[in-house]
Amino acid sequence: MMEKVPYIPQKSQETNIIESAMQRVETIMKDVVASDVKVLTEASKHILQAGGKRVRPQLVLLSYAAFDGEDFEEAAPIAAALELVHTASVVHDDINDHGVIRRGRPSVNAIWGRTFALLTGDFLFTKVYELMAPYGELNVIFADATVALVEGETLQASAVKESNFTRQVYMDIIARKTAALFKAGAMLGASLANAESDQIEAMGRYGFNIGLAFQIIDDILDLIGDEEELGKNSGQDLKQGRGIAAVDNNGDNATNVLDSVKAKLVDNIETATAQAQHLVELAIDELSVLTDSPAKSQLIDLANKIINRTH
Amino acid sequence: MMEKVPYIPQKSQETNIIESAMQRVETIMKDVVASDVKVLTEASKHILQAGGKRVRPQLVLLSYAAFDGEDFEEAAPIAAALELVHTASVVHDDINDHGVIRRGRPSVNAIWGRTFALLTGDFLFTKVYELMAPYGELNVIFADATVALVEGETLQASAVKESNFTRQVYMDIIARKTAALFKAGAMLGASLANAESDQIEAMGRYGFNIGLAFQIIDDILDLIGDEEELGKNSGQDLKQGRGIAAVDNNGDNATNVLDSVKAKLVDNIETATAQAQHLVELAIDELSVLTDSPAKSQLIDLANKIINRTH
């Protein structure tokens, strides 16, 4: 009865390892926002507990596993930091956009007001920095991505203000505000696992391309949401003059010309969907630097899920 | 005529070395905020060019020099990062306080509006991170200080909201929002110069104490400003229910009870001035870990100047 049963790795082991590491990521995020300044902890936990797709930390962990990384205790704080920088930007976005609902719950600014929302975003940024402090050179990759994130948000605010939403401007915005963090995630995982520099670069292109695709699909979903019929729910982007809806609007105020731009929107959505599909294919091609593994399969699945999602 | 004149170090040489390093700090800050997103660069340069006392970077450089640090090219980016994190917090403060004048110029939010001011503050935070990325373990000291800074700002906003400005709360606020960065500055310089851990701790206490004194004097100056007579200019703190003016106000709204709190203010200012003087003495005592040098003399001067300033 006391005889040890030999441990046999299951086919699904790799998946389980990442699931467990993702739980660790949640714990790290929850723990790191603990502060005796209660409002910061409460507001941070509020936004974190609202969930989210957690694509960015998955990218770090899967990319790490794909290069035979095994110490998920070391990888998890990086994954947590990447999700936190995204979360910080979400909190600040909601201030600027007067967003009152985020992830199905009231936004931080809706509950705590603008001042505490601004400080909560700042707090999350400093916690990112705290988590990453022990990781030496990886901070260079991380810092580049956070700079790009803020630049992307700023380009978006400028484009809205100036009604200058050409396709080129749109692509530049989403490259910085979204794809840069996805790229960083894939590169960070690979770097931590000591991948070769050309492999790290390939993973960066994988992350970058699915990041672009992710944001394009996000913007399409913002327009057509659950409602299957176009125009039933015009969404926040349309109201705020940004995203796919605003591309090439030539300075027209989108809210006042809703009917006349419907045909244009259908065109834009079809074009954008095809583009997202193409970007995912390009991303998956980059994974040829990897040998077959459960992690590689999951990276392929992750890319495909980005296209085939409804929320 | 061609004979080389032997180079004789002047008594003021150390001072000159720091002056030149401080110019390097200005150049680094100016260069690092360059971005193709023009509004970020313009707004960042606007606030940087408005000047400021630059006490934090001086602390880094003097502490570094005091432990025989010689590579100011390596030390200057840390000093620049410390000034930038302060600058970022100033930009965000002005959003929360609706500040329209900063350092004698219109604030960033007064010129560019709240959205771009928020993003400029975020941008400066990310640039701090970019500058510090190559500095390994020093990031731990730096991250701790930035967390404390945001916590201090949040405690202040909470205390204003709840009219709960006891002396203890006030000291906790200024310890985090100001003294933590001063402490970090002195520790960073010493650490970079490979000082012993007890020396680094002593420098931390030096920085912390002059940080407290600095903020106390700042709050007194906010109350009495250029005007030598108390009450002529009640200042921003009084209006906003914070700082020395608000200590122990027991929930009264300071703007409505100006006359009745004047006597209390005089008491508070006298007590606070004596406390600041005492803190500077404690700080200077910590410098006994240093051998005599021009840098040590300048650290003593810096501490004394904090008390004897009028702006």
Image: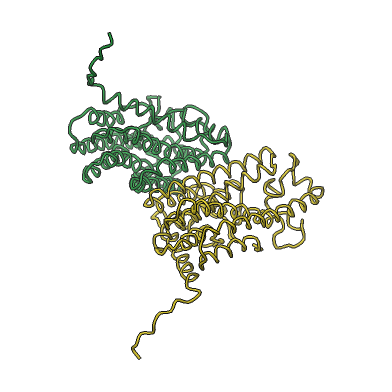
Chain colours: A green, B yellow
The C terminus of chain A is located in which quarter? top left
Front position in the image: B286 or A215: B286
User: Residue B44: x percent and y percent?
Assistant: 48, 56
Outermost residue, top side: A1
Q: Quadrant of residue A116?
A: top right
In the rendered image, residue B200, in percent from the top left (x then y), is placed at 49, 53
Compared with A28, B206 (above or below) is: below
Q: Is residue B309 above or below residue A48?
A: below
- Please identify the quadrant where the N terminus of chain A is shown: top left
B50 left or right, relative to A233: right
Q: Is residue B271 above or below residue A120?
A: below
Residue B112 in sight from this viewpoint: no
Camera sees residue B115: yes
User: Would you say B149 lies left or right of B139 here?
Assistant: right
User: x, y (%) of residue B249?
Assistant: 74, 43
Residue A151 rendering spot, x and y as whole percentages: 41, 48
The residue positioned farthest toward the bottom in the image shown: B1
Would you identify the image quadrant in which residue A8 lies?
top left
Height in image: A143 above or below A306?
below
- Left or right: where A118 falls relative to A249: right
